[in-house]
Every structure is written in C-alpha cells, then in structure tokens.
Image: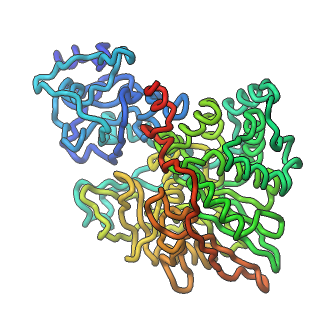
Amino acid sequence: RVSLAASLRDSEGNKIKDQKEFDLTDRSQIVATHTSVFKKRPFGILAYAPSTSGKGAYILKMNEKSRYPGDPQGQAWVAGARRGYAIKTVAGKDVSNWDFLDIMDIIEDKIKDNSAGKFQVDNQGSMGNTAAELPLTIEYAELKGEGGSAASAASNLEGGGSYVDRTDKRYADLPPDATLVEYKIPPAPLAYTSQTVEEIRAYAKSLPEPTGYSGPRYKGGGSIDQAWLETTIANYKKGQLLPKKDAYMMCLDVFDILVKEKTLGRVNVGEGKKITVVGDLHGQLWDFSHMLSLAGYPSPDNTFVFNGDFVDRGPWSVEVVFSLIAFKLRNPGHVFMNRGNHESEMANHFYGFFGELESKYEKRMCELFAEIFRATPLCHVLNNEVFVVHGGIPGPDPRVWWKGIDNQVGFEGRTIQISLADIENCNRFMEPNPAENPLMVDLLWSDPKGKPGYGPSGRMAEGIYLFGPDVSKLFMDHNNLKMCIRSHEVKSLGYRYDHDGEKPVITVFSAPNYVDKAGNKAAVAVLTNKGGTLTGPEFIQYEAQPHPDIPSGAYSAGGPLHPDTVKAAR
C-alpha cells in the first residue's frame, strides 16, 4: 500500500499531498449521509481523491459558493455537498468499494470544453463504466476522524456543531445504517450586508429614465396610493410592466426594509382590527387580483401576512411579487411576508421565476431577488397567539434518517423544545440546506401528518419531516400559542384543519386550480381581535378565474417561454 499511496493522484492528475484513509464498507466510519441531485454537468466539484487504498472517492476541492442564480458550478454547494464528503452511492448503486477511476467514470463530472461538450477524463477504470444519465443522484457519506469531514462539517454550522453519541441506549433499536446528527441552529448576524445589493444599487441609479411609458412611476413608498396599485395591476393584465429603473428601485427599497426585520416577526393586531393570512400564490395574477376584490387591499385597518410561495410555476410571478413589494412599501407596518420553499435560488431556477424575470426584465435582477428572498422572514407570530409559517414547526433532534424509512414510521425525536426566541435569533440569510440550517428547512418544507410523532417526508431524498398532532401541541404549549396557520400544500377547499382540537394546525392555500390542473378552490384566512384575543379564522374561498392562454410552467427550465428555449428556437 505504501507504493500505491505514494503514486496516488486526484481526478485532475495532481499528486495528493495529504492523503486520507477511509473505508465506507465500515459503517462505524460514517456519521451521516447526504443526498444531492445534479441536473447538469459540471457539478461544481473541482477535484476528487481516493482513499490510500485506491478505492472510494471523496471531495478534495469544490466551489464553495454559487456565483449567480442557477450557476451549474455552484450546484454541489447549494445541494449540500461539502469538502471531505465521500461518495457512497451513485444513481442508487453502492460504489463504496469501487476503484477510484471506476467511480470517476460513472459520475463523469469534469468538463474541459463546455461548447464542445468534451469531458476532461476519458474512461479509465477496469469496469468500463459509462456516464450515468442526468438527473443524477449521489449519496455522500460524512466521515469522522482523520479520514473524513466531521470536524469540517461541524464548522460549516455557524456556532459549531456536534454529533450524537450513537452508543446512547435511546438509539439501540435504530437500524445499523441510521444517521443521527444533532440539531444545530446557526445564530443570526448582528447585521447583514450584501456586496451584490450594493453593486446593483449603483447600477440602478445609473439606469436612464424610461421613455414612452405612461403608467404610474415609483418615487419612494409615499408615491404608492390606492390608485397607483389598482392602475398598476390593471396594466399588468394588459402586459404593461413597470419601467426597469422603477422595478430595481422598488426591489432595493424593500430589501432595505426586510433586512432589518427579525427571522421571526411579531405582529400586533389591535382591538377590533383584523388580519388576513394568504397562502401560496404561485404567480397566478388573475386569481390574485380576484382575491383582492374579495379580501380588500392591505391597509392599516386590513393587515396582511403573505405566507410564502409568491412565485414559480404561474407565468405572472413577476407581476404578483411586484404587487406584494408595492404593498409592503406602502404599508410596511401592516404587510408582512414569510419566505416559502419556492423563495430559493434552486427552485426559482428550475420552476420558472428566474426565467420569467430574465425574459421580462433582465438576468441581473435574479441576483437581487435571491438577496430579497434571503432577507425575507421565515415566520410571524400574531398577538403572541398564532404562529404563521409556510411549512411547519421544528423537526426532530437529533435528525434521524435511514434507508427504507417510510411515512408509516413515527418516532419521538425532540426532548428540548425550540422557543420563539430561538427562531427569532436564527440566521436566515442563506439558501435552505438541512446540513447547515435544519430549522430553516423545517419551517419552509415540513408538513403535518395524522399519526403521532415525526416521520419522513416524501418531498426530498432526506432531511425533511412530517410532524404529528402531539408534536405540534408540544411546540404550541411550550410557546403559549393557540394555533398554527401554514400553507405549502394544495387543499381541495383551499383550507384544511390538519390537526384539530384545542390547538389546531390549519393549512391555507390561495392558488385555485393550481398549475391549471388541480381543480382546487383557494382560500385566505381572516382573524379578528375581539376582546383582546384573536378569533377565527374565517375563510374567504374563491374559484380560479379565466386568464390568457399561457400555461403554468411556461417559464420553467425547458418550458416554451424560458429564455433558453426561445433562444434555441431562433
């Protein structure tokens, strides 16, 4: 082995200075696994290296950021891969004991010339593997000790991280391949600044004044009144957008408001006043406009919480989100926005918002919206009584997962409850990633279930959970809450009591006939302060409205109106 180790080279052909010894067939070396899905090559891994045995492959070097929304070279980082992670399975095949070159052949990650589509390394392994088809699922193992990245993975969690002691008798009945990782909450920074935002601020100021435009102009929040809103939404329906300069200035101004808010916002609804919670909108402009005709526009007497998933899929996401921004700029103390799972770079890249934004304005604006969504709070509490969040409540601690886990499995997973203060002080200025910020992922992605305990969600490969009525009651008891209103799921009537009883969990979904196929009604939830306590909710339901013949998903990756599709057709 000495002579072999002395000649080891990485996937780039360079000699490996600090060689690692690991063996993924030895389960005790693995502290956690992470699954990443890659939709195009290259993935953003700059170099892989083998174990000293010549077998296996771990990430030696990688791009540790995404340079722009949808950056292929940032895929691995956004998907949760980290330096030191070793490849366990590729497309469902266990490659733990494969020779290094055989693994390189099947993932065939490195590309030398994108224009020619020529891969840098030809097949070299003895198995003669060909490249696995895309999209490609790779399961990485997080290693402990000298051979892996347990320490570096922990350092990726702000404030540090630690891993659960598997010898604890509480975990004796778990399958041998189960992973257990302690729940860590990265602390919020004292202040958040963005170089991207400041560069765009200078750029926006340099843009010329629009010519040939006769609609409302944006000259600060004070310039927006009811007539401005109604005229602008009417113009949207005619295909007339706000001028690019105005759009940029509105985005910058709303970022400056959102960035100062807490991860968990607290809303006071005065005696006799009401508050309306709006669920997923998904860029369905005609339905959004109809909802406003029923529920009214936001005002000091009609406070609104927009509960995430403003964009994606629906082909008028630009118009809907700019309407919300205008509402926020006009009444910042009476309009509140929660981030949804679709307010993220990867979702916006694949499900249409960034394609639509590039088509209707320009690609650079995508960078600014990525920062706006990172600055958007994750949840709000109304009158210290009602918890409003897009997805759900905090997941299990420790994070437990194993292959074959299904939604019939229920397990207790939290002995220490998360407080509202814990959420309030959590760092939200990042992309959702269960390895870095499990709390954020829980708030954006989790769903209620009927059975007690936690269970696995089918929404992604791992790291997303379902929570039972006992779990939601414990969370609400601990935080003196009486109700949780969330969104995230289509409901046939537009709302549903997923957990009923004394402390219910209620889903409200506000996009009727979702993706032009679901056939569901939509609803918004209205609560009123009567006698010092919030009563309700009462629900305003509505049906889908006729709209121009542009299909849902038109701007999604591969969709007929996506800029790349339009370009290819020329």
Q: Nearer the viewer, residue 374 or 203?
A: 203
Q: Is residue 243 above or below residue 183?
A: above
Residue at x-position 46% and y-position 61%: 446
Residue at x-position 51% and y-position 76%: 496
Q: Is residue 537 above or below residue 245?
A: below
Q: Is residue 117 above or below residue 149?
A: above
- Among the 4 quarters of the image, the one containing residue 241: top right
Q: Nearer the viewer, residue 526 or 466?
A: 526
Residue 365: % across, % down: 64, 34
Q: Which of the colour schemes (rainbow, by chain, secondary structure, one colour) is used?
A: rainbow
- Among the 4 quarters of the image, the one containing residue 219: top right
- Among the 4 quarters of the image, the one containing residue 537: bottom right
Residue at x-position 58% and y-position 65%: 510
Residue 15 shows up from this direction: no
Q: Is residue 395 left or right of residue 532?
A: left
Residue 14: % across, % down: 31, 13
Q: Nearer the viewer, residue 277 or 9?
A: 277
Q: How many marks?
A: 0
Q: Is residue 408 left or right of residue 244?
A: left
Residue 34 shows up from this direction: yes
Residue 213: % across, % down: 79, 35
Residue 475: % across, % down: 54, 72
Where does the N terminus fall, quadrant-wise? Answer: top left
Q: Nearer the viewer, residue 92 or 437?
A: 92
